[in-house]
Image (spheres, rainbow, N blue to C red):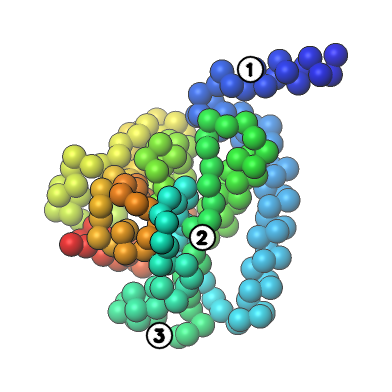
Amino acid sequence: MEKEDRIRQKEQWKQLSPSEKWQYFIDYYLWVTIGVTTGIVILIFLIAHFATKTSFVMGVMAVNTDGEHIEATGPDYFTDFLREHGVMSKRDVVNLNYTIWIDPNSDSDVDSTNLSTIQVLFMTRSVDVFFSDEEFLKLMGGTDYLVDLRDYLPKELLDRYEDQQIKVLNTMTGETIVAGIWLEDNAWVQKTGWYEHTAAVGMADGMKNPELAVALLEEILNAE
């Protein structure tokens, strides 16, 4: 009987849309996974903090990277950017995460774990600038994890990317927001090596450092 129930549950799971799966996860599993994942994140943070005596001034996350030759692999990649914007201490670094992959349509344990990790990193203000494929960015924007870029970026810059704006309905507020910008062969992104050709970028709701996040996103969008 238990086996039949598991089979039936898997079939029902497959019929859910990505947003419905996300909501189901939030309703039934979120707080358990947050508790476990938060403990892991805090442990890693404490180890990193006391071992290196560093402080994260902002966070950058790149999900579902597909580049073969990644150059941006650690905090040092952002040193010049931080210095240009007045962050001079060697202890102040960027918290970079680029090794998380997730299929929002999957019901695997790996994807569920990665989903909870992403959620915890957002909730603990460990993400300021967020990269992913367009589909996953839409999912994040639709569930209140990303800001409306119109509230942060200059209008003239957004106008240049009018055809590449990713607009989604925020299911929490009922408002349509510009959750991100779709990029193709962007010079800044290609230099990192995270993505071969296309990526989407947005900014996290609850950013630790909005000023640096805006500065980085403007640098990305102005890259030739």
Tell me the CA gap for discs 3 and 2: 22 Å
- In the image, residue 165 sits, relative to residue 128, either above or below, namely above
Give yes or no for contact between labels 1 and 2 (Cβ–Cβ under 8 Å).
no
Q: Is residue 140 left or right of residue 181?
A: right
Residue shown at the point (35%, 34%) measured from the top left: 168
Give neighbour class at mark 2: few <14, some 14-19, many 20+ (Cα, 10 Å): some
Residue shown at the point (18%, 62%) measured from the top left: 224
Q: Is residue 148 visible?
A: no
Count the labels in the image. Answer: 3
Tell me the CA gap for discs 3 and 1: 53 Å
- Tell me the quarter of the picture where residue 7 sits: top right
As helix, strand or loop, the secondary structure at mark 3 comes to loop
Residue shown at the point (59%, 21%) measured from the top left: 14
The label number, if any, that marks residue 204 in the structure image: none
**Front residue of 109 and 69:** 69
Q: Position of residue 190 (x, y in %)?
A: 31, 59
- Tell me the quarter of the picture where residue 173 sits: top left
**Front residue of 44 and 196:** 196
- The residue that mark 3 highlights is 88
Q: Position of residue 104 (x, y in %)?
A: 52, 35
- The residue that mark 1 highlights is 12
Q: Amino acid at mark 3?
A: Met
Give yes or no for contact between labels 3 and 1 (Cβ–Cβ under 8 Å).
no
- In the image, residue 89 sits, relative to residue 134, either above or below, namely below
Work out whether mark 3 precedes mark 1 in sequence or the reverse, and give the earlier one: 1
The label number, if any, that marks residue 97 in the structure image: 2
